[in-house]
Image (spheres, helix red, strand yellow):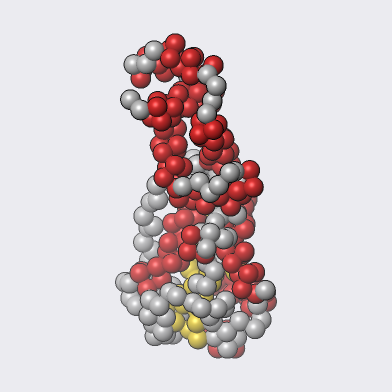
Amino acid sequence: MTGVRQEHIYIAIEFLNIHRGYSVKEICIALKLNRSSYYKWKKRKQSKRELLNLQITEYVKEYYEESNGVLGYRQMSITINREKIDELPHRINVKRIHRIMRILGLKSVIRRKRPDYVKSTPEITAENVLNRDFKATVPFEKWLTDVTEFKYYVGPEVKKLYLSAILDLYDRRIVAYKIGDSNNNELVFTTFDEATSLYPDAKPIFHSDRGFQYTNKFFHQKIVDAGMIQSMSRVGRCLDNAPMEGWWGILKSEMYYLKKFTSRESLVSAIENYIHFYNTRRYQKRLNCMTPCEYYLATAA
């Protein structure tokens, strides 16, 4: 076994002992390792590489726990290199982060498939103007929107909440959102009103699926009055709104699926906190390793 491999195993033993409550003895028995070798490693004079690995390990544990386990090794690499670069001798390779997380047994959560919803008869439909052209060169050029459902539990009773959100394709920011107890016109209309209030000069292509709120004639008039161009996905083609669908997947896998919510207040708080985290703390490789808000402000400046 190589020295590097052995070192990572010892780091894992230390992590399991301190943070998971396993004794060194039972870990070494399970791994078929001699305890004396581990304790000898603990007492040795550590090399620069070993010290750096331990430093990175602490950062990995810090961000993994802070994010409730949602950071995979790619996101972890971006986060550490952005937020800890002043404390490191150089940028840390993503493979090194991956190796340390694998040794520690830390994995990102798995996304689940979004459920289908009941179709309705539309009042007004629009062409698929966006036509899966998800690249935007400036802010407010293309907006996507949708509504998704959440559940929480009050004793044996299942309750529902709905989130309506608008995403800017340029910087992937959530520019406006509303949370409500019903998936109705008011939820979507007030989300749109918030977006136009915050950004009154925005004239984007406004793309949605063919949900009943978006095909409503009054909503169509709101879009016309705002000087926007309405665009809709084709029937049964969820990929026509793929980045919005993808954002729901990120939100639910990194926040919602991690726990069972037992009150409306806790679920609302978790949604609001996550959207703030996503916009201001979640670095994205496609955005030059910036957050959505950083990328937007860099352009605005």
Dividing the picture into quadrants, the one containing residue 134 is bottom left
Image quadrant holding the C terminus, namely bottom right
Percent across and percent down for residue 90 are 55, 47
- Is residue 266 positioned above or below 26 on the image? below
Task: Look at 52% across and 63% down and name the residue there.
Answer: 288
Position in image of residue 146 (x %, y %):
48, 68
Q: Is residue 194 above or below residue 18?
A: below
The answer to whether residue 63 of the structure is visible from this angle is: yes
Q: Is residue 61 visible?
A: no
Looking at the image, how many numbered discs can be counted on the residues?
Answer: 0
Q: On the image, which quarter does residue 190 sit in? A: bottom right
The N terminus - image quarter: top left
Q: Nearer the viewer, residue 7 or 189?
A: 7
- The answer to whether residue 103 is left or right of residue 261 is left
Left or right of 8 in this view: 162: right
Residue 73, compared with residue 175, is above or below; it is above
Q: Residue at x 39, y 47 (%)?
A: 110
Identified at 66% across, 81% down, the residue is 200
Q: Residue 163: image x %, image y %?
A: 54, 61
Q: Is residue 243 left or right of residue 192?
A: left
Q: Nearer the viewer, residue 170 or 188?
A: 170
Q: Nearer the viewer, residue 32 or 177?
A: 32
Q: Which residue is painted at 57% across and 60% down in the image?
A: 291
